[in-house]
């Protein structure tokens, strides 16, 4: 490690927590700031909890612009983009559209594979350190298709790319899926099974991390809002917060969907949109599959979590707000009996819908690394659907950047200046 530095992390979601952990581990003096309380809601809490080395296809891929266009006028589409006049959304949409090319997928899949694989290893290590409290399960993950056409598409699109990059993927017919989940009646044509995938209980993971951080001497500054900066030429001197100015050597921008607004006055031009997703958790479901699964056509993730069953999904680019739209929640509820015929919409009558804002970059790759404009400001945001999976490697990479060490994964495709 270089000499111990004072590092301020702005944002205490799963990404900020992991940055704090890896920075404190190598001896830096870390302050983590979040405007919420210790028991605040954050995006990982209601997530599906997948730790997926197999998620190697970026969100920006061929076929997505068509889905987004359809979603402009259909609030029940899994990908909903209500039209609104917003220059940042227009810029983001243009960059997203440009990224939805085969060439981009071919370039990004190995990058995501390296990040996901490295992060998976760190989860294994963290699970040992935390003594198994995160309910980290190694049961793989199924992507289920209702129709043969979709199965053929998934096989061609996902399973082949995964296998070519060394990620184990098995294409299964309906009988083989049933053999993996003998207690569950499924109405599907088949699916792809990723045996290397894992899942955990997100609330347990972030609680274990928070406790460890306190034990490691990290200053956890809850109920503190960042509202500005003191810049000194090409460096930042301090962050302005409701608890006063905080001076540091290095600053980490880890405020999820709020990262652009938090850094607004720094004029970083970071394209990022909030991708709202919903989840519903049934404490006593009719049955619980053993293996987490995605309903491919409906884009719903199903996770067995410590006795309960969570259904999550939808991507709603309607700005930074946490308004729960009943038609979006209904889209999830009505999809479930199509795959699980024994489930009824009434099963969800008591379930309280949760929503969270994913920080979504236009090309589906996170932003990790130093900004050119302010050399002591480091980005750790834009993880979209992969924030839980990639949190440990993001934290480790940020610590490597602070120390000036060789990063464990090449950072150039993740540069926060790639659109500047
Ligand atoms: C339905 C759903 C399912 C998902 N499932 C998965 C999954 O299975 N696997 C996976 O890998 N990912 C999943 N994700 C994505 C993942 O949850 C996110 O990518 C991740 O949680 C983002 O974390 P973050 O720390 O970047 O942001 P956040 O959790 O949003 O944290 C940002 C923090 O910054 C704080 N903040 C904001 N503004 C300020 C300010 N001005 N001052 C101080 N603090 C501020 C906020 O209070 C917040 O705590 C899912 C997401 C959703 C919505």
Image (tube, rainbow, N blue to C red):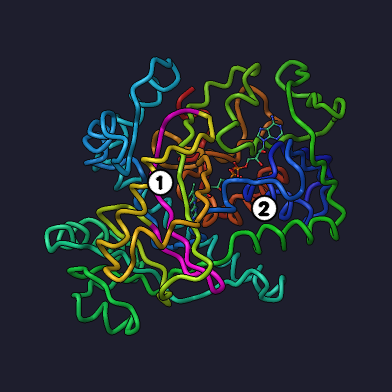
Question: Residue at (80%, 27%) from the top-left corner?
Answer: 241
Query: Camera-side residue: 42 or 183?
Result: 183
Q: Residue furthest left?
A: 149
Residue 346 percent coordinates (x, y): 38, 59
Q: Is residue 67 left or right of residue 367?
A: left
Which of the 4 image quarters holds residue 187? bottom left
Q: Which residue is mark 2?
A: 18
| Disc 1 from disc 2: Cα separation | 30 Å
Q: Main secondary structure of the magenta part?
A: strand
In the image, the segment drawn in magenta is 301-319
CB at mark 1 closer than 8 A to ligand 1? no
Residue 291 percent coordinates (x, y): 41, 74
Q: Assess whether mark 2 and mark 1 are in contact (beta carbons under 8 angstroms).
A: no
Q: Quadrant of ligand 1?
A: top right
Label total for image: 2
Sooner in the amino-acid sequence: mark 1 or mark 2: 2
Query: Camera-side residue: 307 or 5?
Result: 307
């Amino acid at each position: 490690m270089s000499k111990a530095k004072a590092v301020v992390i702005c944002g205490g979601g799963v990404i900020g927590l992991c940055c704090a952990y890896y920075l404190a581990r190598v001896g830096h003096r870390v302050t983590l700031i979040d405007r919420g309380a210790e028991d605040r809601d954050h995006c990982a809490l209601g997530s599906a909890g997948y730790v997926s080395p197999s998620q190697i296809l970026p969100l920006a891929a061929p076929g997505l612009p068509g889905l987004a266009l359809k979603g402009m006028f259909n609030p029940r589409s899994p990908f909903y983009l209500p039209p609104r006049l917003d220059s940042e959304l227009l810029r983001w949409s243009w960059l997203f559209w440009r990224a939805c090319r085969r060439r981009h997928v071919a370039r990004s899949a190995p990058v995501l594979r390296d990040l996901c694989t490295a992060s998976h290893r760190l989860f294994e290590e963290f699970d040992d350190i935390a003594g198994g409290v995160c309910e980290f399960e190694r049961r793989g993950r199924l992507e289920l298709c209702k129709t043969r056409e979709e199965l053929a598409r998934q096989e061609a699109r996902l399973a082949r790319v995964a296998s070519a990059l060394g990620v184990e993927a098995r294409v299964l017919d309906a009988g083989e899926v049933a053999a993996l989940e003998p207690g569950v009646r499924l109405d599907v044509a088949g699916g792809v099974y990723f045996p290397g995938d894992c899942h955990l209980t997100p609330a347990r993971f972030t609680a274990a991390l928070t406790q460890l951080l306190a034990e490691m001497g990290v200053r956890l500054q809850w109920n503190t809002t960042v509202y500005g900066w003191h810049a000194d030429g090409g460096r930042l001197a301090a962050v302005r917060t409701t608890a006063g100015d905080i001076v540091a050597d290095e600053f980490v921008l880890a405020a999820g969907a709020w990262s652009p607004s938090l850094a607004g006055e720094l004029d970083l031009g970071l394209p990022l949109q909030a991708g709202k997703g919903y989840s519903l958790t049934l404490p006593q479901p009719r049955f619980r599959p053993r293996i987490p699964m995605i309903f491919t056509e409906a884009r719903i993730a199903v996770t067995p979590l410590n006795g309960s069953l969570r259904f999550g999904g939808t991507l709603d680019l309607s700005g930074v707000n946490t308004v729960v739209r009943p038609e979006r929640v209904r889209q999830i509820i009505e999809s479930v009996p199509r795959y699980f015929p024994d489930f009824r919409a009434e099963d969800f009558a008591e379930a309280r819908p949760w929503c969270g804002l994913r920080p979504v970059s236009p090309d589906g790759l996170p932003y990790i690394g130093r900004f050119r404009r302010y050399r002591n400001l480091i980005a750790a945001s834009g993880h979209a659907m992969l924030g839980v999976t990639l949190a440990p490697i993001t934290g480790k990479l940020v610590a490597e950047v602070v120390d000036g060490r060789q990063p464990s994964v090449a950072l150039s495709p993740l540069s926060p200046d790639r659109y500047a």
